[in-house]
């Protein structure tokens, strides 16, 4: 895993070497092992810069340093990620006469590009973001992996300049690029806790979408999609055959992700997904797997006991870390800095702190992200099917029932969320609402009238087109494209790379994604039994009390902390003149909400979390231009 940055411009500047150096220095944490930069010009008076920060994982020698130029001298690459199938690809290329000077997967990409051009992407199984400068075509070719595991941001001034990097903070080092708020995307954040691709919370700063690539040549930028889930036709597989195929795919995915020239470990929560990964890793290792878990100080919500039981079962070299409310508070500004955006979830902080501890032992960890989205792990996947029933159409459109449900106390918040989500007829709005901190109407009530009048229509026009045949198809597709990519994967990348540690995600092998969307839906959701086929595969490796235990997730008791340990922190940020002078939020509504929470009248932890992180982002980024 690494950090990359670069540009292609026709604006003359004698200082581009120093500019590129400052760009990669801004993301030093992504690759502290080595660095290099190349700046060169072409016949069209274009100036191209490629910079790289390296976290050495494969071929630790200096030969693996980037930017890397091909044996032919035609192409130069900067690459962030891992190509898991690079070894058989290399064997095939060598048999055809292609030459190699390193043992890296980076050089495999270069030779594949010179052989196949843009179609080289069809051969790669991995997580990646890379930029290749083609000297003959005088163009930049930039690509991101199919599921968006590795990030790539860019800013484009038509006809003159294209700037890109692994993190937004790097792009802001380029002269003439200034921080400006994308106000319609800010509304997106208030509703969803993240900004949907291809936009970001900064005006003009874009994300390259998963499964897409860019070509920049002679001042023109072209974007193309090379992969997507488009075939939803269900395969005629028996359940036993599907179970066997999933088992084999998982085993192969984990075997490939254990290839490394540095120590590899795993994050272990004690839940189904991470426990299954550890079980399969143990089968593929002659040494104890290093596992890592995080918990809360003096908390009833700890999952450390479950993780420890799995660690004991597979005799791992297990490490536990405990965090306090002070650790949490003191890390808020750090998390926002590394994310280049407001923090979306409280779990961002334990992920960051655990990664810093894990780095003392390993440089690579396997994690369980993606299983819920692909195999139907969330309760909403089971409940949303009720919208298509005759009974559901009656119950979820009844005003009397709606009034009764919404009058329930906060302790019934999950039931209220479910009812209100199922009452939304528009598919995309319903999918968004299931994971939103609060409904659109609740979020909009916090915004000032002036701000809404100016930007709300732009935000409402940003709903995407969703692929799929059935409701479950469309719901999982939406989550894979947005919730997973823009929230969970961004969190994982930023919090782990902040500690210079590489996260690998076995469930997000693209072959598993294609498999998941083409098996029968009853194999994923069996009645109300979620992730059914994954659980059946897991029976070969894990005991029932791990497979079928209730999913808890990493819960942070911020409702109590906001009333006690973090009370002053909250009021200093959200009841300040600085906050209200931004003109974004309704002062009266925010004051009422914060005071009602602090006084224990109602629970507004989610609203306060959203507003608090937004204000931290303003103070630490936008205000510090």
Image (cartoon, grey):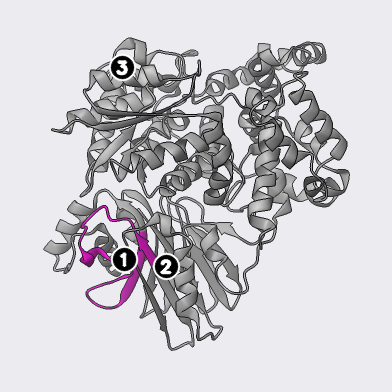
Q: Residue at x 64, y 34 (%)?
A: 432
The answer for how far apart the CA atoms under marks 3 and 2 are is 48 Å
Say which of 50 and 349 sits in front.
Answer: 349
Q: Would you identify the image quadrant in which residue 414 lies?
A: top right
Q: Is residue 583 left or right of residue 436?
A: right
Q: Residue at x 66, y 60 (%)?
A: 624
* Residue 344 to residue 25: above or below: above
Please provide percent x and percent y for residue 106: 28, 61
Can the viewer see residue 167 in this picture? yes
Please provide percent x and percent y for residue 517: 43, 33
Label 2 neighbour load within 10 Å: few <14, some 14-19, many 20+: many
> Which residue is identified by label 2?
141
Front position among marks 3 and 1: 3
CB-based contact (under 8 Å), mark 2 and mark 1:
yes
> Of the numbered discs in the image, which one, if any, rests on residue 309?
3
Q: Please tell me whether mark 3 sits on a helix, a strand or a loop.
A: helix
Q: Give the residues in magenta.
A: 52-79
Question: Which callout, 3 or 2, points at the residue further toward the start of the chain?
Answer: 2
């Amino acid at each position: 895993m690494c950090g990359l940055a670069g540009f292609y411009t026709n604006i003359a500047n004698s200082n581009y070497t120093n500019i590129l150096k400052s760009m990669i220095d801004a993301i030093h944490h992504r690759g502290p092992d080595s660095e290099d930069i190349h700046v060169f010009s072409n016949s069209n008076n274009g100036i191209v810069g490629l910079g790289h920060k390296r976290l050495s994982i494969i071929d630790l020698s200096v030969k693996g340093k980037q930017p890397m130029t091909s044996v032919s001298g035609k192409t130069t690459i900067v690459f962030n990620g891992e190509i898991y199938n690079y070894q058989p690809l290399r064997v095939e290329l060598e048999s055809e006469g292609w030459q190699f000077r390193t043992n890296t997967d980076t050089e495999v990409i270069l030779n594949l590009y010179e052989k196949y051009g843009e179609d080289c992407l069809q051969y790669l199984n991995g997580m990646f973001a890379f930029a290749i400068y083609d000297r003959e075509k005088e163009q930049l070719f930039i690509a991101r992996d199919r599921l968006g595991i590795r990030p790539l941001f860019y800013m484009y001034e038509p006809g003159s300049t294209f700037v890109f990097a692994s993190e937004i903070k790097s792009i802001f080092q380029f002269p003439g690029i200034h921080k400006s708020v994308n106000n319609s995307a800010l509304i997106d954040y208030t509703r969803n806790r993240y900004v949907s691709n291809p936009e970001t919370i900064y005006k003009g700063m874009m994300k390259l979408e998963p499964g897409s690539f860019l070509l920049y040549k002679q001042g023109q930028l072209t974007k193309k999609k090379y992969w997507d889930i488009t075939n939803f036709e269900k395969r005629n597989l028996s359940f036993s055959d599907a179970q066997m195929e999933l088992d084999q795919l998982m085993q192969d995915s984990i075997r490939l992700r254990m290839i490394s020239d540095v120590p590899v470990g795993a994050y272990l929560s004690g839940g189904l997904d991470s426990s299954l990964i550890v079980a399969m890793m143990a089968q593929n290792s002659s040494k104890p797997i290093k596992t890592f878990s995080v918990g809360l100080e003096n908390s009833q919500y700890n999952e450390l006991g479950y993780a420890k039981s799995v660690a004991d079962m597979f005799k791992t070299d297990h490490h536990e870390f405990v965090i306090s409310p002070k650790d949490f508070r003191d890390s808020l500004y750090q998390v926002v800095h590394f994310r280049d955006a407001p923090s979306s979830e409280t779990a961002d902080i334990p992920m960051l702190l655990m990664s810093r501890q894990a780095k003392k032992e390993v440089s690579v960890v396997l994690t369980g992200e993606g299983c819920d989205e692909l195999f139907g792990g969330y309760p909403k996947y089971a409940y949303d099917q009720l919208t298509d029933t005759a009974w559901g159409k009656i119950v979820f459109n009844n005003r009397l029932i709606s009034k009764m449900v919404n009058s329930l106390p906060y302790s019934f918040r999950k039931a209220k969320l479910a009812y209100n989500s199922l009452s939304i007829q528009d598919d995309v709005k319903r999918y968004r609402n299931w994971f939103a901190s609060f409904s659109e109407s609740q979020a909009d009530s916090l915004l000032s009238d002036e701000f809404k009048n100016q930007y709300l229509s732009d935000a409402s026009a940003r709903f995407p087109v969703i692929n799929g045949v059935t409701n479950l198809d469309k719901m999982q597709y939406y989550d894979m494209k947005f919730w997973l990519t823009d929230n969970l994967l961004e969190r994982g990348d930023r919090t782990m790379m902040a500690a210079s540690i590489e996260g690998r995600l076995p469930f997000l092998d693209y072959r598993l994604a294609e498999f998941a969307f083409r098996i029968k839906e009853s194999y994923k959701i069996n009645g109300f039994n979620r992730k059914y086929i994954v659980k059946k595969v897991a029976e070969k490796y894990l005991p029932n009390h791990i497979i079928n235990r209730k999913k808890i997730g990493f819960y942070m008791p911020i409702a109590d902390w906001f009333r006690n340990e973090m009370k002053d922190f909250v009021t200093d940020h959200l009841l300040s003149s600085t906050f209200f002078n931004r003109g974004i939020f309704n002062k009266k509504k925010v004051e009422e909400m914060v005071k009602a929470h602090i006084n224990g009248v109602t629970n507004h932890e989610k609203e306060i979390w959203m507003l608090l992180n937004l204000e931290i982002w303003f103070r630490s980024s936008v205000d510090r231009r």
